[in-house]
Amino acid sequence: MAKYYDVHPDNPQPRSIAQVADSVRADALIAYPTDSCYALGCRLGSRDGIDRIRAIRQLDDRHHFTLVCQDFAQLGQFVRIDNDVFRAIKASTPGRYTFILPATREVPRMLQHPKKKTVGVRIPTTSSRRPCWRSWASRCCPARCCCPARRSR
């Protein structure tokens, strides 16, 4: 069953954020706006959520999923970053960029590329999403869902 939550982009209500967080913890699939397009998201490690995203987007097992992180501390939990990569990411974030990096052991295998053991990571600029991550006890695993008619050329 689909539910619609209206979250104000500049001043999100804590009650709305809590309802969305509860839905994610209950293995719901969410669609939310990002700074570049819309994304589908689920709880990190949710096999059912990952399979539903793959079915909706018609993805194969070699697709790089993107983990949306709140800050560099959370980014370091999921990917291995050396000094040069850290400097490049620091100069580009927060922003619309997704970085494909080697995954740590905290990333479930179903999210990693099967041969390369890599995963996409991103720190968004949109401030309305930041309270969501603070309130979610479990992390979210989004997959970008750009509509072909809306893609910039």
Image (cartoon, rainbow, N blue to C red):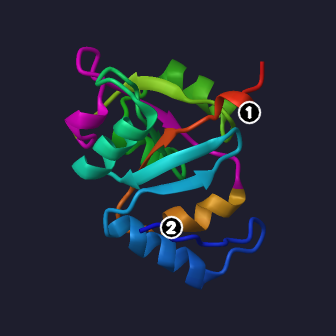
The chief SS type of the magenta part is loop
Q: Amino acid at mark 2?
A: Arg
Q: Is residue 82 in view?
A: no
- Where disc 1 sits, the SS reads helix
Q: Quadrant of the C terminus?
A: top right
The residue closer to the viewer here, 77 or 18, is: 18
Inspect the magenta stretch and tell me whether residue 121 lies in it: yes
Image point (67%, 40%), residue name: 37
Left or right position of 128 against 39: right
On the image, numbered disc 2 is attached to which residue? 134
In the displayed structure, would residue 140 be above or below residue 54?
below
- In the rendered image, residue 81, in percent from the top left (x then y), is placed at 42, 28
First along the sequence among labels 1 and 2: 2
Image point (37%, 33%), residue name: 79
Left or right position of 24 against 150: left
Image point (35%, 38%), residue name: 55
Inspect the magenta stretch and tell me whether residue 53 lies in it: no
On the image, numbered disc 1 is attached to which residue? 150
Question: What is the span of residues highlighted in magenta in the rendered image?
Answer: 106-126
Q: Is residue 12 in view?
A: yes
Q: Amino acid at mark 1?
A: Arg
The residue closer to the viewer here, 143 or 123, is: 143
- In the rendered image, residue 6, in percent from the top left (x then y), is placed at 66, 72
Gap between marks 1 and 2 measured at Cα: 30 Å
- In the rendered image, residue 83, in percent from the top left (x then y), is placed at 49, 23
- Where disc 2 sits, the SS reads helix
The residue closer to the viewer here, 66 or 62, is: 62
Can you tell which mark lies on residue 115? none
Q: Residue furthest top?
A: 115
